[in-house]
Amino acid sequence: MSDEKKSCPAPSKAEPQAERSHLPMWILALTLVLLYLGAVYFDHHGGWFDKEVYAPYASADELDSYQPKSGAAAALAHGRQIYEQVCGLCHGVDGLGKPGQAPPLAGSEWVMAKGVQRLAHIPLTGLTGDVKVKGNDWNMSMAAMGAALPDADLAAVLTYIRSSWGNGMGEVTADDVKAARTAIGAHPQPLSGEQLAKMPE
Amino acid sequence: MKNGFLVFVAAFVVLGGSWCAFVLAPELQLGGAKQTSVLNSSDVYPVQRPGDATLGLQVYRANGCAACHTEQIQQSGMACDLVVTSMGKNRAAFMQAMGEIGDLIYKNNPKDENLEDIVTMNKWKPGDPVRLPVFQNITKEIAAAASDKITTAGGKAEIHINATGADISRGWGLRHSVAEDFLYDYPVQPGSLRAGPDLAGVGARLPDANWQLLHLYAPRSVVKDSVMPPFRFLFEIQKIGEVPSPDALNLPEEFAPPAGYEIVPKPEAKELAAYLLSLRADVPLYDAPFTSLAASTNAPAKKP
């Protein structure tokens, strides 16, 4: 140690200095390639930040293509929607009817008839006067609430009424509604319960 | 500092960029989330939890449930089921369509068990009971093509869309989780570790409050090999009074308190159970569509 103390320290080199240099070309190229691949991946998987598109869907179009568009369940849901808008106010969303307003549809012998022609006539012409529903007498008047609905929509409503609330009856097709409309003709008069009962099911 | 301004600008851009990506962008994307409607229905989703379930969310938080349970279901894909609902009147045309569909499915997946249904159909003779085929786990394109063939032949078919993935096959849910599932959660507790099962649909899976209480008091009384710690401090042991408490747990002998005593849940336990029952992310939404076979039991009966 003592020897070293005597010797002079060697003159140190100058502080290293950072110098600017050119960006290597390969880094630039790699960055661009990665950016491109990222953009392609985003294009295929990103869904364009649409808040409704989650994995595994890649785009709003793909999500749209998986929406159930047909089938009995969709038709039934459509019928329910119209029922609640048009019929539910008086007949109740539970189909139980309302005293002084409208008779029940749940378990009604008019709804659960074998054929659908009588049922299809009611919303197309309206109903007035005495009618017996589930053993009770009703004397109300119903306007032709369904006359303005397209055949397919009215068929969906009638299908909903016939298959809900434990009624468990079959489908009403647009053709059934069309047949009823043809039978009624251009100037519908509100039917009475008697007239309705005389009609074939 | 040399180039101080440049360093400041660079740091600002980097931090500001991450803030935009991780705070601003999600806020713009989902900040306006609100109630949405259930697919093909006039019901809205989600609905505000009842009061005790809202309190239960805080119990869930206080006990760190989210440390071991997630509330997010993952989904890896979609599969379609094609349910034939009517053969129509032209039996020959229908059988021809069945044959073509068999080819279509076989081309896609040579080992498909769906073919059995077609073979059974081919052996059908007048007078036999009709078992209409159901083609499962086919792609959307094949389902659409097959449905077209059946419709052209005069029959009718429905396409059902199911979510697929590990979580779905475990029975934890019917679809992936979406932002609306958490609309009324504060704080949102999606969790990240699954020491226990996912709870996003637990209210639909185990809808019995009594089961939930038993499980909280003594997990192994209802799930044999459960690794969940018992949460006994949410319950009280008390002497049975003149009449037993209506809330008292009906425990198996191994877990039961000494004779003359009963276990009753504290309000926290009841609130937590109410919260668990309110976790039911099981309705189809536009952003998470599905139609299950179970849902089609509501379909109209055949025309008489």
Image (spheres, helix red, strand yellow):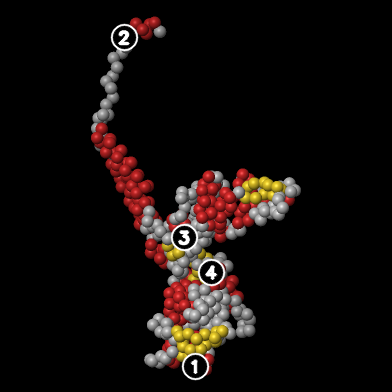
Residue A138 vs B250, above or below: the answer is: below
- Disc 2: host chain: A
The residue shown at (44%, 71%) is A69
* Residue A29 visible somewhere in the drawing: yes
Quadrant containing the N terminus of chain A is top left
- Is the residue A127 above or below the residue A41 in the image? below
Q: Position of residue A89 (x, y in %)?
A: 45, 75
| C-alpha gap between disc 2 and disc 3 | 83 Å
Q: Residue at x 29, y 40 (%)?
A: B12
Quick one: A68 or B55, which is closer to the camera?
A: B55
Tag 4: amino acid = Ala
- Which residue in the structure is indicated by mark 3? B46
**Badge 3 local density, few (<14 within 10 Å), some, or many (20+)?**
some
Residue beneath label 1, please? A195
Structural crowding at the residue carrying mark 1, measured as other residues with C-alpha within 10 Å and reported as few (<14), some (14–19) or many (≥20):
few
Subunit of label 4: B
Instruction: Look at mark 2 in the image and give the residue it sits on.
Output: A8
User: Residue beneath label 4, please?
Assistant: B295
Q: Residue at x 59, y 71 (%)?
A: B116
- In the structure shown, which secondary structural element does the residue marked by tag 1 occupy? helix
Q: Does the CB distance between marks 3 and 1 fall below 8 Å?
A: no
- Crowding at dot 2, Cα within 10 Å, few <14 / some 14-19 / many 20+, comes out as few
Q: Is residue B199 visible?
A: no
Q: Amino acid at mark 3?
A: Pro
